[in-house]
């Protein structure tokens, strides 16, 4: 008992210290701003977030629900300046977060209060070496900008479903999209990174320089530092850069058949074919619908032949678009992912990886959604999305080639809701979590596994990183971020007994 009470006292003391520290940072913000200004090169910018120019000149967040809060925002002009900010924050115990595209949405970010926003906007360069098949980008270049530059150069790389995310943030967590069927995660094509670590050093990290850290950057990178630049291997565009996007809508009544057909693709999906589907309640159709979007990196005739089992189900709507691959994220699933570019959302995210298609369980989930959503309109913004990319790309790289732990996952399920207001967040949260748990029961994995970028923040570190990779990631933490400065975004814990 004695040890219980002393532990409790110690814990209460720690909580108090943290609160006191956060409070102190909030109050000291003008001084922090002054001190940073005096440390940084003249082209850097420093503002208080209370200054109106913060909202117009700095990157704003996609989700403002359970978001981090900042008192000072800084735009370092150079990698040396990034190092100065990191060392200043470390020495003065001020929390900070690097901001790339501002699209990270895990609720774990809300633990950061009254911090420094390290806005990487000055690092937005993109340079492609056509002959060498490489691309170097700055730490804030956006997915859309990267995609368009690659397409214009006749190259390609896996990009995600949302054009507005930072391509560096995306890559540091793995980075998955339709062309992962061909090339694996975006991080599998990483050649090197320029990184300011938690010890304030500027390192070049690659297969030959700090190879241990290079391994960890590919899937868990935001735990170790601020990447000012990344260099990738890129590939000549498949099929001359032309893709076929096929969108279909099925009524909920057909869900069992759709899952059945889908399960036939599972595990033997051609590498050129990616699919995204979304399951939700459509008021105008009076019930559940399944909307499927396919992308095929090849000729339309081949795509149509492959999709025959779906076409034979007579979808309520069919759309076939021949499109440059750069436009795929804009048009797949009827352009639904464009909503992901709107800043300021009250986002409620959950996710679970699937390792099999459990048809009876999926029918149960859809039935539960139908019953609940028919009775309660408040919850109808909750949508299930399902991304399924061919295994070929992921299997090109061995499991131990990087920290990315989901090569065997065949579907990444997300249950996401855009809450119309902060008041409705708790109801949507409860419903979305219940759906996550129901999907998990048929996932083919005993414990919850979640792609780190899609996580809610309530999962365990083992769910994000896998128990087999965590010890190595924790060892890297001790070396490159011993003070846990990078601990806000679904983080690798330093302590072993955390999980
Ligand atoms: C609508 C939507 C759709 C998405 N679709 C996909 C998808 O299809 N596939 C996929 O893989 N992901 C997808 N994501 C997830 C996305 O990849 C992550 O949210 C990613 O973190 C976004 O990076 P960001 O720079 O925009 O975010 P930020 O919020 O700026 O950063 C997120 C985290 O990464 C860190 N970070 C960002 N840049 C750097 C840097 N240069 N150096 C070090 N750390 C950095 C931040 O400090 C923070 O911890 C989607 C997200 C949204 C909102
Ligand atoms: C707000 O920021 C702008 C741009 O950095 C600066 O010129 C201005 O002086 C700031 N205003 C205040 C009140 O600090
Ligand atoms: C992206 O491209 C747009 C349009 O060319 C440009 O205005 C913007 O500065 C670029 N931003 C980033 C972060 O890459
Ligand atoms: C889903 O499919 C099953 C099996 O065909 C069917 O019994 C059920 O009614 C369908 N669900 C909905 C919501 O239509
Ligand atoms: C809908 O669900 C929410 C949350 O569970 C609840 O507060 C609300 O009363 C429900 N509305 C109806 C009409 O059942």
Image (tube, helix red, strand yellow):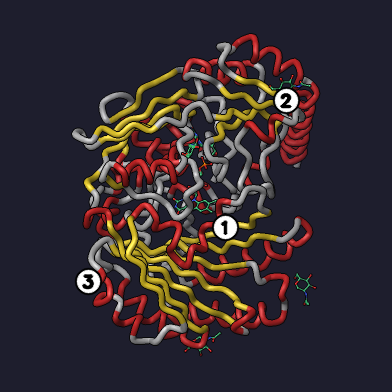
Q: Secondary structure at mark 3?
A: helix
Q: Secondary structure at mark 2?
A: strand
Q: Is residue 411 visible?
A: yes
Q: Nearer the viewer, residue 458 or 230?
A: 230
| Distance Cα–Cα, label 1 vs label 2 | 30 Å
In this rendering, position of residue 40 left or right of residue 389: right
| Distance Cα–Cα, label 3 vs label 2 | 56 Å
In this rendering, position of residue 84 left or right of residue 245: right
Indicate yes or no: mark 2 CB to ligand 2 under 8 Å.
Answer: yes
Indicate yes or no: mark 1 CB to ligand 1 under 8 Å.
Answer: yes
Give the residue pinned by disc 2.
48
Q: Residues within 10 Å of mark 2 (few under 14, many from 20)?
A: many
Q: Marks 2 and 3: in contact by CB < 8 Å?
A: no
Q: Which quadrant does the N terminus fall into?
A: top right
Q: What mark, if any, has residue 302 been given in the picture?
A: 3
- In the picture shown, does residue 376 fall above or below 26? below
Q: Answer with mark 1 or mark 3, whichever residue precedes in sequence.
A: 3
Q: Secondary structure at mark 1?
A: helix
In this rendering, position of residue 115 left or right of residue 490: right
Q: Nearer the viewer, residue 285 or 6?
A: 285
Query: Which one is closest to the eye, mark 3 or mark 2?
Result: 3
- Kindly identify the residue that appears in the image at 68 percent across and 47 percent down: 64
Give the residue pinned by disc 1.
339
Q: Residues within 10 Å of mark 3 (few under 14, many from 20)?
A: few
- In the picture shown, does residue 62 fall above or below 51? below
- Kindly identify the residue that appears in the image at 51 percent across and 59 percent down: 337
Q: Answer with mark 1 or mark 2, whichever residue precedes in sequence.
A: 2
């Amino acid at each position: 008992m004695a040890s219980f009470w002393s532990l409790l006292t110690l814990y209460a003391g720690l909580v108090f210290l943290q609160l006191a520290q956060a409070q102190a940072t909030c109050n000291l913000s003008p001084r922090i701003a002054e001190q940073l200004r005096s440390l940084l090169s003249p082209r850097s910018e420093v503002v208080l977030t209370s200054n109106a120019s913060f909202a117009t000149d700095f990157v704003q967040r996609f989700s403002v629900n359970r978001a981090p809060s900042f008192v000072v925002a800084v735009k370092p002009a150079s990698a040396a300046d990034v190092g100065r900010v990191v060392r200043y924050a470390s020495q003065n115990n001020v929390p900070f977060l690097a901001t790339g595209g501002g699209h990270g949405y895990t609720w774990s970010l809300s633990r950061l209060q009254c911090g420094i926003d390290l806005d990487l906007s000055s690092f937005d360069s993109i340079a492609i070496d056509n002959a060498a098949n490489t691309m170097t980008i700055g730490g804030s270049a956006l997915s859309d900008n990267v995609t368009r530059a690659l397409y214009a150069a006749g190259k390609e790389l896996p990009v995600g479903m949302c054009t507005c995310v930072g391509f560096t943030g995306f890559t540091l967590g793995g980075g998955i999209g339709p062309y992962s069927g061909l090339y694996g995660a975006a991080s599998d094509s990483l050649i090197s990174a320029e990184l300011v670590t938690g010890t304030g050093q500027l390192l070049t990290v690659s297969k030959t320089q700090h190879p241990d850290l290079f391994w960890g950057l590919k899937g868990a990178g935001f735990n170790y530092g601020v990447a000012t630049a990344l260099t990738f291997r890129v590939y000549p565009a498949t099929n001359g850069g032309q893709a076929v996007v096929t969108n279909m809508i099925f009524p909920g009544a057909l869900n069992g058949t759709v899952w059945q057909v889908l399960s036939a693709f599972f595990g033997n999906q051609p590498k050129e074919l990616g699919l995204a589907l979304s399951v939700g309640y459509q008021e105008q159709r009076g019930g559940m619908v399944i909307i499927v979007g396919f992308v095929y990196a090849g000729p339309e005739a081949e795509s149509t032949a492959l999709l025959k089992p779906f076409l034979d189900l007579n979808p309520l709507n069919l759309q076939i678009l021949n499109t440059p691959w750069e436009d795929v994220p804009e048009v797949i699933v009827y352009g639904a992912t464009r909503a992901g570019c709107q800043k300021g959302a009250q986002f409620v995210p959950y996710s679970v990886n699937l390792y099999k298609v459990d048809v009876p369980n999926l029918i149960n989930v859809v039935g539960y959604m139908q019953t609940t959503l028919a009775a309660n309109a408040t919850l109808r913004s909750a949508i299930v999305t399902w991304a399924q990319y061919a295994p070929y790309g992921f299997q090109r790289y061995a499991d131990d080639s990087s920290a990315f732990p989901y090569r065997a996952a065949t579907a990444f399920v997300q249950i996401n809701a855009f809450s119309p207001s902060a008041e409705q967040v708790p109801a949507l949260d409860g419903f979305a979590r219940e759906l996550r748990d129901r999907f998990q029961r048929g996932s083919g994995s005993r414990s919850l596994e979640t792609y780190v970028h899609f996580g809610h923040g309530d999962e365990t570190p083992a769910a994000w990183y896998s128990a087999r990779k965590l010890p190595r990631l924790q060892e890297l933490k001790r070396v490159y971020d011993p003070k846990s400065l990078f601990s806000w975004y679904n983080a690798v814990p330093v302590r072993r007994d955390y999980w």
